[in-house]
Image (cartoon, helix red, strand yellow):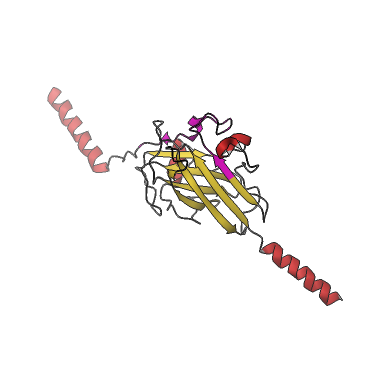
Amino acid sequence: MRKLALFIFGLGLASATQASVTLSIDVGGMKQSNGTSIAAGTIGILVVDSSGDGFSGSTAGSYSSIVGTQLTANQNLFGSTDDTILKVFSASDLSGSGDIGFSGSLSGYTYGGAIGQSDKLAIYWFPGVTTSGATLGAGQSQMGFFRSDTFDSLSAPGGAGNGYTTFALPADGASLAISYYTTSPNLGGGIAPSSLQAFSIGAAVPEPSRALLLGLGMVGMLARRRRK
């Protein structure tokens, strides 16, 4: 009898460890920094923050912290050990009417390591980057970042709502569906379309070399001598 009880307990433990989640993302209305829609083929990523200390590179001033990141699943944002890429997207027309955004699912994802229930999610997009697996460079000029836990019932396509609109991982064994569109006043809930607009991060300005600085200094000295 004791062996049977242990066997049943073992089965329950095994099933618990094998539980997994399904993520479904349909987010449209992504914009470039000038307010126009991103182009089809633009690369975006779904990222999880497993430590709760915020997302690397989420603002223009912090973009340099993710320069060098390779846009592939299971990669950490460069310089970070807790911001992990769960999925890479290629933008497409989600509604057939020019609503460019990201759609995809991640089925059977099993929690492990530092990633688990309630970890926050965010979407990044990179206007001008169209190759999955590309490495972000310092000269990249735009980046979008978005996450929210305040979507309402209108957030699903058609305004029907689906009850799973929080940008955070669900309980083990559950599903998460985030749907959001901004091109129609009847869709999207209370989030302004400007929330899905990328910001300009500017190109990197190389520092002048020592030789160049020395040369400029000599030119200045010669000019002073001539004036004397």
Residue at image position (47%, 36%) is 29
Farthest residue in the left direction?
Answer: 226
- Camera-side residue: 106 or 76? 106
Of residue 205 and residue 159, the one placed in the foreground of this image is: 159
| Whether residue 5 is situated above or below residue 216 in the rendered picture | below
Image location of residue 107, percent across then percent down: 57, 57
Residue 228 makes an appearance in the image:
no
Residue 87 appears left or right of 210: right
**Quarter placement of the C terminus:** top left
Q: Residue 40: image x %, image y %?
A: 39, 44
What are the residue bounds of the magenta stretch? 178-202
> Where is the N terminus found, in terms of image quarters?
bottom right
- The answer to whether residue 57 is left or right of residue 168 is left
Task: Name the side, left or right, on which 74 lies relative to 142.
Answer: right
Residue located 62% across and 55% down the image:
21
- Percent across and percent down for residue 133 are 40, 54
Main SS, magenta residues:
loop
